[in-house]
Image (spheres, rainbow, N blue to C red):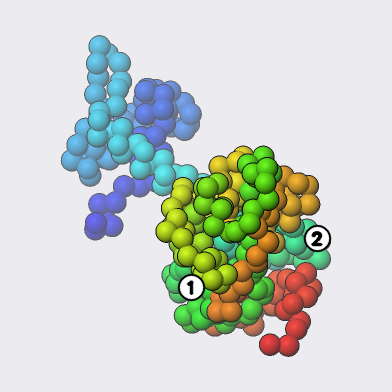
Amino acid sequence: MNRRYMPSLISMQCFEAAARHLSFTKAAEELNITQSAVSKQVGQLEAILATALFQRVRKRLQLTPEGSVYLTEVRKVLTQVEMSTRYMLSYGSRNEVLNVNTLPTFGVRWLMPRLNGFRFKHANLYLNISSRIDLFDFDKENIDIAFYYGRGNWPRAHCTKLLDEVVVPVCSPDILPAVPLTSPLELTRMVLLQSSTRPEAWHDWYEQQGFHTEHSYHGPRFETFMLSIQAARIGCGVALVPRMFVEEELAEGKLVIPWHYAMTDSHNAYYIAVPEHAHQAPKVTAFMAWIQEKAPSLNAAP
């Protein structure tokens, strides 16, 4: 769209307020402008869109179907503008923001417990933490550091190995059979909980032990380990998850390991990725030093 024809922020604010109150007068009172100004701004929006946003029914203002659709989009824009503004107001010119991305379960179960105290040591460095599963392009995303699982070959990124992964099956003690298992194949009777990001996990776990089952790909599928762990806790089946994510549940007896075989992956591990152009930035090196202190394996020789 030619920017000349893009609606102004004030016109969207007027439209959103009028739609919320279903009244130009109340919208004007909220925005501290005149009723005619609100009407004019909404009229300009309707001219740009070439569609009516409101209609009068029995002298009452109502949104048209097109107006309802547009209201949803306008609220997204206004919310983003407000969030961006608050974001900038929160961090003064003497402060820096470090944008960190993490895998969801890794962030909750491993990273969060290790961030306690970081703020006191780095008073002028604010962490902005997000989570996602898929890899992304550092050149297109405002991310300074990313934690991920893979082979340490993120494009155009400096990768540091953080942790190896040990995977174990876990389930609620309530679904364990009375008689101890004599084979890992017996787990298939308890439902194998599948991971969307590790579709080969059960197949590989069985294969490493010299077993094969046609059920290794069968069972409800979960996007994150966090969901799999919760499903296992309430007795939905057996989850195959990194042990470091369930140490607390195992210690408390909320989860048990029904068959003691731990699977390791010689190819993949947890890494910290930093854009090549930013890996020497002071805020990045400060965070890396903190993580290195909390994860002694980073100090080990490769």
**195 sits to left or right of 147:** left
Answer with the quarter of the image where residue 27 lies. Answer: top left
How many numbered callouts?
2
Classed neighbour count for the residue bearing mark 1: other residues with Cα under 10 Å, few (<14), some (14–19), many (≥20) = some
Q: Residue at x 73, y 64 (%)?
A: 124
User: Is residue 103 something that shows in the picture?
Assistant: yes
Q: Which residue is at the far bottom?
A: 301
Q: Inspect the image, locate mark 1, and give the three-letter code of the amino acid beneath it.
A: Phe
**276 sits to left or right of 53:** right
| Front in this rendered view, residue 195 or 137 | 195
Answer with the quarter of the image where residue 233 lies. Answer: top right
- The residue beneath circle 2 is 117
User: Is residue 97 something that shows in the picture?
Assistant: no
Classed neighbour count for the residue bearing mark 2: other residues with Cα under 10 Å, few (<14), some (14–19), many (≥20) = few
| Front in this rendered view, residue 156 or 178 | 178
Residue 164: x %, y % from top left: 65, 73
- The residue beneath circle 1 is 138
Mark 1 → mark 2, Cα distance in angstroms? 28 Å
Q: Inspect the image, locate mark 2, and give the three-letter code of the amino acid beneath it.
A: Gly
Does residue 68 lie above or below 286 as drawn?
above
